[in-house]
Amino acid sequence: MQVRTRHTPSFGVARLVLAPGEPVQVESGAMLASSYGVTVEARAQGGFLKSLARAALGGESFFVSTFTAPQQGGWVDVAPNLPGDLNVLELDGRVGWCVTKSSWLASASTVQLETQWGGFKSLFGGEGGFMTHAVGQGPLVLSCYGALDVVTLQPGEYVTIDTGHVVAYADTVQSRLRQISQGAVQSLKSGEGLVFDFAGPGQILTQTRNPRGLITWLQANGLGARS
């Protein structure tokens, strides 16, 4: 699979170019268009229980759409829900990546997706208690809200990042989740809540906008979801 991006960094679209008969995994509802003859099947990726974990705990869709190219090959265009940049990681089979919810957009069929515990975020009303762990070989397409920043840590180097701005980080990076300030009242006043402490070596992908901030703005202006 080859990935060609366009309209970045503001309104990224990824074209997934497929060889004859090649399948690709895509987040449910992310398809924008495809070449004629490409077939699609919604599958519970990794079985029922793993898919249930992705949906209920990781904030992702229960089903993963698998697009398969016809014998002459084909392409699939995919786009995220929120405006922003795209990033393509080439997994080498050695280093996996932890991806926060809603950041995974598509990946080669040779990339496996697993749900793993990402800390006690759900207990404090954060970004959700689980992440998607991507391992294997091939392209992994990630989306972000706003622009993408890459933080590269050397061995023994540390950084603190708000949970709402983290897109993904490599397995080589050590992470710890904590409250940025003491006490729930102070956390509410600061508007920060929870942060990740990361230790190198390795890379962390971050987004310049926080989806939580968008939800807060919509609610404050009477544009949020109504029951």
Image (cartoon, rainbow, N blue to C red):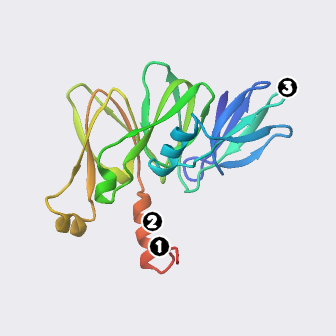
**Farthest residue in the bottom direction?**
222
Determine the CA span between mark 3 and mark 1: 46 Å
Tell me if 211 is positioned left or right of 72 in this view.
left
Q: Which residue is mark 2?
A: 214
Secondary structure under the numbered disc 1 in the rendered image: helix
Tell me if 61 is positioned left or right of 215 in this view.
right
Q: Nearer the viewer, mark 3 or mark 2?
A: 3
Tell me if 156 is positioned left or right of 116 in this view.
left
Q: Residue shown at 20%/54% (left/top)?
A: 180
> Which badge, 3 or 1, comes first in the chain's sequence?
3
- Residue 24 picture quarter: top right
Q: Which residue is mark 1?
A: 218
* Disc 2 residue type (three-letter): Leu
Where residue 94 sits in the image (x, y, percent)?
A: 44, 18
- Residue 15 picture quarter: top right
* Disc 1 residue type (three-letter): Leu
Circles 1 and 2: CB atoms closer than 8 Å: yes
Q: Nearer the viewer, mark 3 or mark 1?
A: 3
